[in-house]
């Protein structure tokens, strides 16, 4: 029931490749470069390169954030390579959050397919917060590169589908960038003004070291 809606708005997004050739199905035998993957030989392309079935399955929300993102970026979905678009599924269990994160290479449109989601982003100009409680059928635009979040706003699971203006929009989650690597606690304390005990606690929970 939700599929016609999100395919329609996907098609509205711009295409960066169209002026050169019809398509460039990702060839995973070579690495992804700044312009995407190289093209699979046209003779080997089939309709299945343009179809991705992975978003029908709920993501695993058994984690600290009680949420799951299932991407259909160029790395998973060869058909979007070079087209300037991609897609993802977001599952938020009851109490689930998608913590502050950015997509450095793409703007986003979020469509709430089920439940209620509190979504917001923070402007880079003066840190103004733009936030709204979205219900089923609402869509929200998130400008490229800005920090944003989604929180389940009700007592039922929430489901959203997300389109991006890039085949490889990227995903960087702020908490994981801070607390899931080997950046020394002392340096994090200096650069964030958080206290060391809290940093060590979060490193412990999220798998960071040092
Ligand atoms: C979901 O993830 C949890 C934690 O990693 C794991 O224990 C569990 O087996 C996973 N469930 C499924 C259905 O994959
Ligand atoms: C931030 O920028 C917006 C848009 O220009 C403006 O309306 C708002 O007053 C600004 N807020 C602050 C705290 O400067």
Image (tube, rainbow, N blue to C red):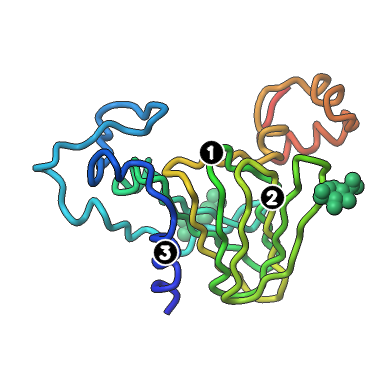
103 shown above or below 29: below
The foreground one among 31 and 158 is 31
Q: Secondary structure at mark 1?
A: loop
Residue receiving disc 1: 105
| Disc number lying in front (3 or 2) | 2
Indicate which disc residue 57 carries: 3
Question: Few, some or many C-alpha atoms within 10 Å of disc 1 (few <14, some 14-19, many ≥20)?
Answer: some
Residue 61, numbered label: none
Name the image quarter holding residue 93.
bottom right
Q: Which residue is mark 2?
A: 148
**In this view, 186 is above or below 145:** above
x, y percent for residue 175? 71, 40
Which residue does the image show at 67% across and 33% down from the upper left? 177
Q: CA distance from mark 3 to mark 2?
A: 24 Å
- Residue at 32 percent of width and 57 percent of height: 52
Spatial CA distance of label 3 from label 1 is 26 Å
Q: Earlier in the sequence, mark 3 or mark 2?
A: 3
Instruction: Pick the quarter of the image with the N terminus.
Output: bottom left
Q: Is residue 10 left or right of residue 172?
A: left
Residue 85: % across, % down: 42, 49
């Amino acid at each position: 029931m939700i599929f016609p809606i999100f395919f329609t708005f996907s098609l509205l997004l711009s295409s960066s490749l169209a002026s050169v050739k019809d398509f460039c199905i990702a060839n995973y035998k070579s690495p992804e470069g700044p312009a995407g993957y190289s093209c699979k030989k046209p003779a080997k392309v089939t309709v299945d390169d343009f179809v991705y079935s992975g978003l029908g399955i709920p993501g695993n929300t058994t984690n600290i954030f009680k949420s799951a993102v299932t991407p259909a970026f160029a790395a998973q979905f060869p058909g979007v390579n070079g087209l300037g678009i991609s897609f993802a599924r977001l599952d938020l269990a009851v109490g689930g959050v998608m913590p502050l994160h950015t997509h450095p290479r793409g703007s986003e449109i979020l469509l709430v397919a089920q439940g209620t989601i509190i979504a917001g982003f923070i402007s880079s100009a003066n840190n103004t917060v733009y936030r709204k409680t979205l219900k089923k059928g609402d869509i929200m635009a998130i400008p490229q590169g800005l920090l944003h979040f989604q929180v389940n706003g009700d007592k039922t699971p929430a489901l959203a589908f997300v389109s991006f203006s890039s085949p490889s929009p990227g995903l960087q989650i702020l908490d994981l960038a801070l607390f899931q690597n080997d950046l020394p606690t002392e340096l994090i304390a200096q650069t964030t003004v958080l206290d060391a005990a809290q940093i060590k606690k979060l490193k412990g929970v999220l798998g960071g070291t040092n």
